[in-house]
Image (cartoon, helix red, strand yellow):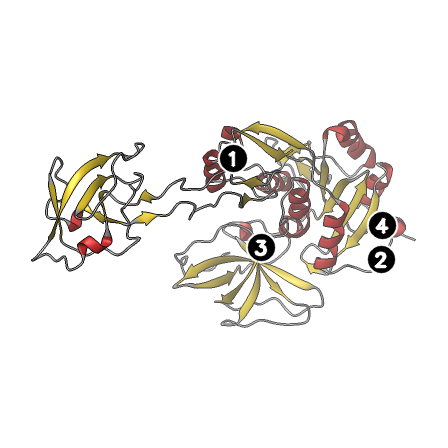
Amino acid sequence: MHRAFADAPNRAPLSVEDAQAVILESLAPLPVERIPLVDSDGRVLAQAVVADGDVPPFDRSMMDGYAVRAADTAGASWERPVPLAVIEEVPAGCSPTRRVGPGEAIRVMTGSMIPEGADAVVKFENTAEGYNRNVATVHVRVPARPGDNIAKKGEDMAKGSVVLRPGVPIGAAEAAVLATFGVAEVAVYRRPVVGILATGSELVDVHEPLSPGKIRNSNSYMVASLIRAAGGVPKLFSAVGDSVEAMLAAVEPHLDELDALVTTGGVSVGDYDLIPDLYERLGATTRFWKVLARPGQPVRYAVRDGKPFFGISGNPASAFVNCQLFVLPGVRRLGGWAHPLPRTVRARLVNACSAPPIKPDRFLRARLYEAEGELFVEVAKGQSSGMIGSLVGANALVRVKGGTAVEPGQVVDVVVCGEWPSIPPKKKALR
């Protein structure tokens, strides 16, 4: 029996969904820590936030204008404006001291508390006086309806409602909500530290000169960028050759510092594919070693004491696909994301796909964009697993079910790998 199968509980390759389920079910979020709100951008919320008050906390004006009784403005027009007595001015941040009675108005600013008796706000532009201050009478030129230009108490967020749930990455909107409710210190999940080890005797580091038969280690930097975008903290090790002892020496002293390990290369069944041996020496139990996906069919997932090891392909495109489908969901799971799997959408294919129908599902690098309210996707011309250039500009993977083909104009399944533009790119296809 080949060593690649020695610790595999199931030699049959798994579907992408089954492999993802194995990963997510084997992992749990890391411990929670508390950090200042100002430092929480990009972190994953570990607490539910319940509104301890209404937002807005009072009926407030949405415009600069006059708080009025809508009934008093009935019949108002530009030719025959309705006069109302101005009895007070209420800047934002101040409370009104008067009640609006029949035939009266109070000057208010955006954000001002609506005085009692008023049920509408007439904006300055709809009065004869416009923005002029210190007027005793205002002439309303447009009839108001009850509720006009008023934000009702609690209409944004009601007291007692859950406004944020755990597992949400904190961005601008979440930070604003947290600040609104006075959450100065935030409970977040600890960011997973992910070790990255590129293997292969052909590799040299980025600062080293090339010699015949050598290539630079690009995978570590690609994987590190993806890990960082998923909320992880990448820890890069220097690339090592095809030697289990060298691999052990590189990572074993640091395992206690890591929450996960990603190795690139050496995952197939060739003479120099040593990742199965490495994982065995490290005491990790393999959960699967092959998936029904191309590129990136050989991919090894192992676990040691709840710590995931991802053995992904050394081919750049395969490594990219392996990361999107398997590594990043695992990292997000450790980081506490409520929804760790990649987003999927449907989009219309705009160009021909030359890849032949094969049994495993294919994941083709592509560019996703929106035009006139519809999503379109353009498949890169170069789909070889060793191509790096076709990754540039690729923000999606077109999924083609095993044994099927796709044609231009067909709506296809797309795995989203990044933001997409709303303006279509140039007609020239990716390389």
Label 1 sits on residue: 41
Q: Is residue 358 visible?
A: yes
- Ranked by sequence position, the earlier of labels 3 and 1 is 1
Along the line of sight, the residue nearer the viewer: 256 or 200: 256
Marks 2 and 3 sit apart, C-alpha to C-alpha, by 29 Å
Marks 2 and 1, Cα distance to the nearest angstrom?
Answer: 42 Å
Residue 376 falls left or right of residue 105: right
Check residue 343 in the rendering and tell me which mark sits there, or answer none: 3
Q: Earlier in the sequence, mark 3 or mark 4?
A: 4
Q: Indicate which label's residue lies in the foreground, 2 or 3.
A: 3
Disc 4 residue type (three-letter): Ala
* Side (left or right) of 188 relative to 71: right
Amino acid type assigned to the residue bearing label 3 in the image: Arg
Q: CA distance from mark 1 to mark 4?
A: 42 Å
Which residue position is annotated with label 2?
A: 11
Tell me residue 408's x, y (percent). Answer: 51, 71
Displayed quadrant of residue 401: bottom right
Callout 3 environment at 10 Å: few (<14), some (14 to 19), or many (20+)? Answer: few
Depth-wise, is mark 3 or mark 1 nearer the camera?
Answer: 1
Give the amino acid type for the residue marked by disc 1 in the picture: Asp
Question: Disc 3 or disc 4, which is closer to the eye?
Answer: 3
At 66% across and 70% down in the image, what residue appears?
357
